[in-house]
Amino acid sequence: MTQSDDNRTIGRVVATEAMPAGPHQFQFWTATDTDLGIGAIVRVDGERDRVVYAVVTDGRSYSDLATPLHDVVAAEGDPAGTSGPTRRTEVRLWTGAVLRQYPEEPLQPVPLAAVRMATKEDVEFALRMDTYMRVEPVGGVPIGLYTGGGMSAPVYLDADFLLGPASAHLNISGVSGLATKTSAVEFFLTSMFQKFPSHKGSIAAVCINVKGPDLCFLDQPGELTDVDREMYRQLEIDPRPFDRVCYYAPFKADGVNLNTLRSHPDLVGSVQPLVWGLREVLDYHEVLLNRDDIDAKSDAFIDFLTDRVVEKEFTDEWGTTHRVCTFSDLERLFRSIFEGLEAAGRSDMWRTHHIATIRKVRNRLLNISTRCKGLVTDDGTVSDLPFGDFEDRSVQVLDVAGMDQLAQDLVFTRVVSKLREHLERRDLGVDHVIVFVDELNKYAPGDGPDTYVRKMLLDISERGRYLGLVLFGAQQFRSQVHRRVVGNAGTTLYGRMDMDELTTPGYQVLSPATKIKLATLPKGELMVRHPHFTQPVFVRFPRPPILPGPIGVQRFPPAKDVDFEDAVVVQLSILDRRILPGRVKELIVDHREEEVRRALLATRRAQPDDVLAFFKAALGTAVARERVGGGGGTTTRLKQVEDPYAS
Amino acid sequence: MTTRSAGHLLKDAILAANGKVAGTSVLTHVPQPLSRPFSSAEALEHESVRAIDVGAAKTSPSGTGFLDGIQRYSVAGRFGLVPVIRGYVAAAVLGRRDESLSVQHHASEEFVAVSIDRLSADQLRQLETTGLPLYDSGGADREHPILDIHLAARVVESRRESVELAVMQSHLRDRPGGWLVVDGSMTSYLRQEDESRILGLIKSHETQFLDGDDLRTALTLPAGYRSSVFARGTDERDKAYTWYLRLWPWDEHDLLHGLVRLERAPTAEAVEQASEISAWMLSERSPLSAPDSRWDRLIYPIRQVESYLRAHVGEWL
């Protein structure tokens, strides 16, 4: 608390009966030529070693001009007229919001004393960072640099309040393109991975890329300026990209070309296909099926399928034994039911389920593999995240930017649910997982229907900190996100904000000057709210040491889609560059596409030494293709019943 | 038929007889008698006083100083009928550079003024224990509770002039060759070294030096005009060169609105530079000294000196 020589007096606390100094807020004046600005941290040294730390939240300037009319008279009505040989006396009056008082008891009004710029030590004490930075083991993670009065000081967040258990979650708001939300999260993840205290356990991140190439190049180094490097030096962070990143992207509808902007031949090797089958989908059917459409009867039938049929031996009334593992198997089961009922002359009920309900469920379920084509396959092949084998300081990027909203919802819901399951069992592979989700207002809107995704996000927000499941959410408009989701975020960051957004009730605690600063905040600067900070604090952060998405796409242009055969060659060539395209094409020429896809996926998953041999074995023996409509086989004609749910 | 008010009727009458309508200040008290309503003048620049256009406003040289002083006093108590006056005087010079005013010199004094001869030894000893300087206000043969206060007030005024003089000397010593504008007459500053760089700015016109057409010309100057320079005072020791200057139009106001009188030491240079110095003063119309009631004659830097001194008065306010 001692005052160093380098923080000269810059102002003096003033108080009047109409404008008294309180224990939480006070006014002080400075010279007009001052380095002080909104967000600067100052200290006031009172008598008997009382020290008050405060952040500047407002500033006003006025002269001794009693009315504008006097200026008009002096200028003789001519705005261009001379302003006179003497500049009017001007006052710079600032409002300081108290961050901390020493001693903390008894809490008293701010003394009417000299005001000084805060030093590095003052910033640490004012923000209560000493409670976790001045103890062993240290528990802080740098979020950026406070700058003010020609000085900069690292600002640390308390790890216990970031990843739990005391508090958790981080939320960032700001307008697109100017708030640098993604850059801030990338920088902060870098900071977390390097500075998260080892005694607090292992940590991994799952980033869901929902738009463009934002998160597609986390393993590629970006360009930094000298200013950035100096900031990294002060923050004691090594500016290097993530070294353990794995990308997951679904296929496009063709089932072989990956649906990602990270498809350049030099990078696509680190992209794993994200492919799910019936079981992966059925558990989350609530995400995919419209609750207004699926009534209790449909629900009951889906539950019946889930509990009694899927991945079990199931024998129907007509003696056929089914083992439903894929959408194709499910389709066979439905066909068997319809044909059986037709043959038995009973077309209305099957095992207490009405035929209309069965038809509706069939239509909706089988439609999933069509609507989520590329992610969901008919044939049961699965390629998933390494649940159970997550590595410390690893990043899993799910690139779902090219998928439709329904498929994005499914990916998000299932991945987060699986993370939660594994964390509850403590068998994920790491102790903490950060899930980064952009466009939170889309997944957890403040209004609109109560979706499964939103319910799950609420659950993470409220219970995740006990599990180590931490949500890093970003959105343009915080006011449009469910208030329990943003309210449970222990740490909140704000980039450049929209003025309309700032007029909403959630920002009433901010002074008009702070709002103006937020509305004009430059790139690379954020306002931070953290449980230890009694007032919002502005920090600057360096560019992340990562190739920005738009530049990455220029440097690594996505590969063009190729036809099925060439795509298979490309996929296998990633595993073994010596593979001859002609040989691959010979192998697959007589196989159905789903067989080739299954073999390809198995080969990618296994990553064998002899890729071609493994692929050939996985393909199996070629089956002669049947001619459809050739009249060779006999089919039982179904009774012509119009499917009312076919649309 | 509308009935015109008496005010309007009177205005009409004045205008009809080629008079000028004045402002609307309402007075309730008979003013104190003027102590010295008339004095003499000696023509200098012209045989009879003329109105001279001073041209465009010009800024005075950088580093020009502005001097003013204040005085405060109160009756602290009495020994019998004898009043004990506590006085405070202060003076300051603000210098102007790059359009900004800053304090160059400041002096103040707190003291006691009392009729010493009327005090007992014990009373005098008790006053001395305060550590404040004691000044004798004298006294008439007969005690008079009001007159005695008037006499003490003269002491206060005298102390203010002393402090102002000290501040002026300090300023001229530190900034030789620089201009100094003082609030009021420069009588006290005559015969000082560098007196030619001192400009007195007088806002009140209790004493009239001119008469007849000369007076009419001087007091009815249009805005931006000055009168011819003339010498005021008959005693060589008090003689100063002076002229009137109209800062603001007096249409719709009374005769003395915006009228100031400037004084300089009696040198030939004073006559030669009258128009240029008047142009400096015209530039001081901005910024306006409003809301001070004297804004039409009080220039902003002098007002700032007053504000500075008032801010230091503390408990005397």
Image (cartoon, coloured by chain):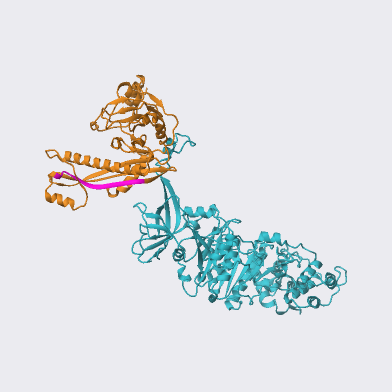
In the picture shown, does residue B161 fall above or below A4?
A: above
Residue B222 location, x and y as percent? Answer: 39, 27
| Residue drawn 24% across the image and 40% down it | B158
- Say whether residue B217 is left or right of residue A172: left
Q: Is the magenta stretch mostly helix, strand or loop?
A: strand
- Say whether residue A125 is left or right of residue A194: left
Q: Chain B is drawn in which colour?
A: orange
| Residue drawn 75% across the image and 67% down it | A255
- Say whether residue A197 is left or right of residue A552: left
Residue A474 location, x and y as percent? Answer: 58, 62
| Residue drawn 62% across the image and 67% down it | A240
Q: Which stretch did the figure color magenta?
A: B104-116
| Residue drawn 30% across the image and 28% down it | B232
Camera-side residue of B167 and A140: B167
Q: Which image quarter: residue A292?
A: bottom right
Residue B285 location, x and y as percent? Answer: 40, 35
Q: Does the magenta stretch include residue B106?
A: yes
Camera-side residue of B27 and A621: B27
Q: Does the magenta stretch include residue B178?
A: no
Q: Which chain is cyan?
A: A
Number of marks present in the image shown: 0
